[in-house]
Image (cartoon, rainbow, N blue to C red):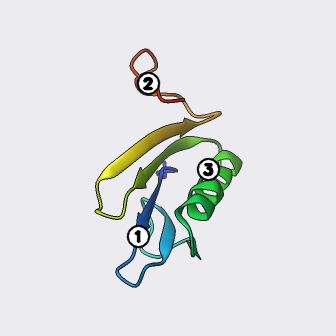
Amino acid sequence: MSNKNRTVYRRSNGDWVNKRDDSDRASSVHTTQKDAETTAKEMTKNQGGGEVTVKGENGRIRSKDTVKPGKDPNPPKDKEH
């Protein structure tokens, strides 16, 4: 079973990357974090759901969101969305 989770992070050159966690290469590269996050969520939804992790400019996790039809691993604690 492959990992459908994705991470959005910033490269040192300033580009924002949407990358599937089990991949070596970026799925897409964007100029804004919002564009990268939107694309990551769309791709995750199309692949059957999963978790999207968004990191800030400093590399720390800003948010995690379960994209349906994926199952939220912590439904009662996830108050963000």
Element under label 2? loop
Q: Residues within 10 Å of mark 1 (few under 14, many from 20)?
A: many
The mark found on residue 67 in the picture is none
Residue 31 % position (x, y): 57, 75
**How far separated are the C-alphas under marks 2 and 3?**
17 Å
Q: Residues within 10 Å of mark 2 (few under 14, many from 20)?
A: few
Q: Tell me the residue at 33%/49% (across/down).
A: 61
Choose between 63 and 6: the one closer to the eye.
Answer: 63
Residue 51 % position (x, y): 49, 43
Q: Tell me the residue at 35%/64% (across/down).
A: 57
- Looking at marks 1 and 2 on the same chain, the residue that comes earlier in the sequence is marked by 1
The mark found on residue 10 in the picture is 1
Kind of residue sitting beneath label 1: Arg
The mark found on residue 78 in the picture is 2
Residue 20 % position (x, y): 49, 61
Query: Does residue 12 appear to the left or right of 27 in the view shown?
Result: left
- Looking at marks 1 and 3 on the same chain, the residue that comes earlier in the sequence is marked by 1
Q: Tell me the residue at 49%/71% (across/down).
A: 16
